[in-house]
Image (cartoon, rainbow, N blue to C red):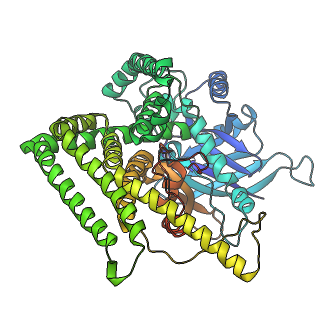
């Protein structure tokens, strides 16, 4: 029988003592966590292991002995270590030994009763696997993705042993809180033996985070309660709040802040990673917003934008008037229905006149409106972009009206042609299948341009809201924190000696990092693909600039 012994590399140079760790019978593996050094009292060692088991719920025990020979002959130490098996009984009993000045190790695993031979001791083969205890402790092992020719169950079963190793080291963190400077009765060697990692700034931040989070959480609760008052529920305010991108983004930002400043402790590493991703996303969003605010207020760019907006609107209106007058005549030499052209043309020109009048009426206040839009960037770049999206929707409302009127007329035309076509073929309408024939149609480029601009803004907002920046930063700077699996490098493979391997962590690919830790977006706007846009334009269906009830959520 071959046993796997996972040994921390930080203990390779430790003095002789006892091997403390966990035995995993399902995998026939021993996970060594620390080395207990001499002198020690067995009762105190057992008391320490009982405390660790009570705090971490990990079955920590003495697995065997560790002998690091630093002198020529230490026969008395060998006999003493062999006698410890009677005090700390464990089946099997590991005996690891490293010779002085040699790279070779000796590993034995003895059992008092061998299989098929009751009462006769036996010795098992040992495969020694070295691992970096600090990296394994700080890393999070992700379930492996199933290969195309391999079921997911097989991949999960193959990673069961690795999951046991990672879980054992992660849950035994209480064992690593003592270092060589402690005056406790038991002296240990582990990855923090030279001193527990700590920082004065980190400790001060931990102590101050509690009251600050409690205060901010109370303020956020007041804001949430104020947003649900009855005055804001009067019609049509709820309808407007549900259609504006700004309200959806503010609601999403309020949920993000409530999650970040929540006083509840994260239950697992996934929730902690989500909190960190949300915090970094909010900080980056606010930083980009402040950069935009600084750029707008530098060299009076807001005034320049306000002065250029009205001439641009007049130029767009002039081009639309020329287009409508061209369509009211004989476009491309085609003879059209003059009465219908005049009615529709004057109808659209009237809408265009109302829009120009509205723009000139609002021209004295445009600079102040842009100033407030720039000031809203203090809440984040996504808030400013959402306001910009709503402003574009309001400024292009006449174009949307043109599209709605034209789409409805085109839909009636399609329905009439399809009815005539079915009547010509002697067929009838199938109510069960809801099947409608169609004819060709030219896309409305102006409406597509507005949809493309707003879609680009929404994609940028969703990218800032949902991108797991903290996880990507960990993957870039500390790839071992996000583990997809491990790989083994052979250190020694000679006949008559135990096989020694070095376990190294394989980092999680960037695509899986984004897929696993992607944050939810605000979901306040529709997510149309180019295929659905073309289909709706082709069949005369309306394209709404807001999310409908039947739309699928992300």
Does the image show residue 349?
Answer: yes
Image: 381 above or below 510: above
Q: Residue at 33%, 59% (x, y): give it.
A: 346
Q: Residue at 64%, 71% (x, y): give it.
A: 495
Q: Which residue lies furthest to the front in this view?
A: 339
**On the image, which quarter does residue 295 sit in?**
top left
Image: 169 above or below 331: above
Residue 76 in percent (x, y) is at: 61, 40
For the image, the number of numbered tags is: 0
Q: Residue furthest left?
A: 299
Viewer-side residue, 15 vs 167:
167
**On the image, which quarter does residue 348 sit in?**
bottom left
User: Would residue 446 appear left or right of 497 to someone viewing this image?
Assistant: left
Does the image show residue 95?
Answer: no
Image: 529 above or below 372: below
Residue 497 in percent (x, y) is at: 63, 64
In which quadrant is the N terminus drawn? Answer: bottom right
Image: 521 above or below 218: below
**On the image, which quarter does residue 207 sit in?**
top left
Q: Residue at 40%, 51% (x, y): give it.
A: 458
Residue 3 in percent (x, y) is at: 72, 55
Residue 194 in percent (x, y) is at: 40, 35
Q: Residue at 74%, 51% (x, y): give it.
A: 28
């Amino acid at each position: 029988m071959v046993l796997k012994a996972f040994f921390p590399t930080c203990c390779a140079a430790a003095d002789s003592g006892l091997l403390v760790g966990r035995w995993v019978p399902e995998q026939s593996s021993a996970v060594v966590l620390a080395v207990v050094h001499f002198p020690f009292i067995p009762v105190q060692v057992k008391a320490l292991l009982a405390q660790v088991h009570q705090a971490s719920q990990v079955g920590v025990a003495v697995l065997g002995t560790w002998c690091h020979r630093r002198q020529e002959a230490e026969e008395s130490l060998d006999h003493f270590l062999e006698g410890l098996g009677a005090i700390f009984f464990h089946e099997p009993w590991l005996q690891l030994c490293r010779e002085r000045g040699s790279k070779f190790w000796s590993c034995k695993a003895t059992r008092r009763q061998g299989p098929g031979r009751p009462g006769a001791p036996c010795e098992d083969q040992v495969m020694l696997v070295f691992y970096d205890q600090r990296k394994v402790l700080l890393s999070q092992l992700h379930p492996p993705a199933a290969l195309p020719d391999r079921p997911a169950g097989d991949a999960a079963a193959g990673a069961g042993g690795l999951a046991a190793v990672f879980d054992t080291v992660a849950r035994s963190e209480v064992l690593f809180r003592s270092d060589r400077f402690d005056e406790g009765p038991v002296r240990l060697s582990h990855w923090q033996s030279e001193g527990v990692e700590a920082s004065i700034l980190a400790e001060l931040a931990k102590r101050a985070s509690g009251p600050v989070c409690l205060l901010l959480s109370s303020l956020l609760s007041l804001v949430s309660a104020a947003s649900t008052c009855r005055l804001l529920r009067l019609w049509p305010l709820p309808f407007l709040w549900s259609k504006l991108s700004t309200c959806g983004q503010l609601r999403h930002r309020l949920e993000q802040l409530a999650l970040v400043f929540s006083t509840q402790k994260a239950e697992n590493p996934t929730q902690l990673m989500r909190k960190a991703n949300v915090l970094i996303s909010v900080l980056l969003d606010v930083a980009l917003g402040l950069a935009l605010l600084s750029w707008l207020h530098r060299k009076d760019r807001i005034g320049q934008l306000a002065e250029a907006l009205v001439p641009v609107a007049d130029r767009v209106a002039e081009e639309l008037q020329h287009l409508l007058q061209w369509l009211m005549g004989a476009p491309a030499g085609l003879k059209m229905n003059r009465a219908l052209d005049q009615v529709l043309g004057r109808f659209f020109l009237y809408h265009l006149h109302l829009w120009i009048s509205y723009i000139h009426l609002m021209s004295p206040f445009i600079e102040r409106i842009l100033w407030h839009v720039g000031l809203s960037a203090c809440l984040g770049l996504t808030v400013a972009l959402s306001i910009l999206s709503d402003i574009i929707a309001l400024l292009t409302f006449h174009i949307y009206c043109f599209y709605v009127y034209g789409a409805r007329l085109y839909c009636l035309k399609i329905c009439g042609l399809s009815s005539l076509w079915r009547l010509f073929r002697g067929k009838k309408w199938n109510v069960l299948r809801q099947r409608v024939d169609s004819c060709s149609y030219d896309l409305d480029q102006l409406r597509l341009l507005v949809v493309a601009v707003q879609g680009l803004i929404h994609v940028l907002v969703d990218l800032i809201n949902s991108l797991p920046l903290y996880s990507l930063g960990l993957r870039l700077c500390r790839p071992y924190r996000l583990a997809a699996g491990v790989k083994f490098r052979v250190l020694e493979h000679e006949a008559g000696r135990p096989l020694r391997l070095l376990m190294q962590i394989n980092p999680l690919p960037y695509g899986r990092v984004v897929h696993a830790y992607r944050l939810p977006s605000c979901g306040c706007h529709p997510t149309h693909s180019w295929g659905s846009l073309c289909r709706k334009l082709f069949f005369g269906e309306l394209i709404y600039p807001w999310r409908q009830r039947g739309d699928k959520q992300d």
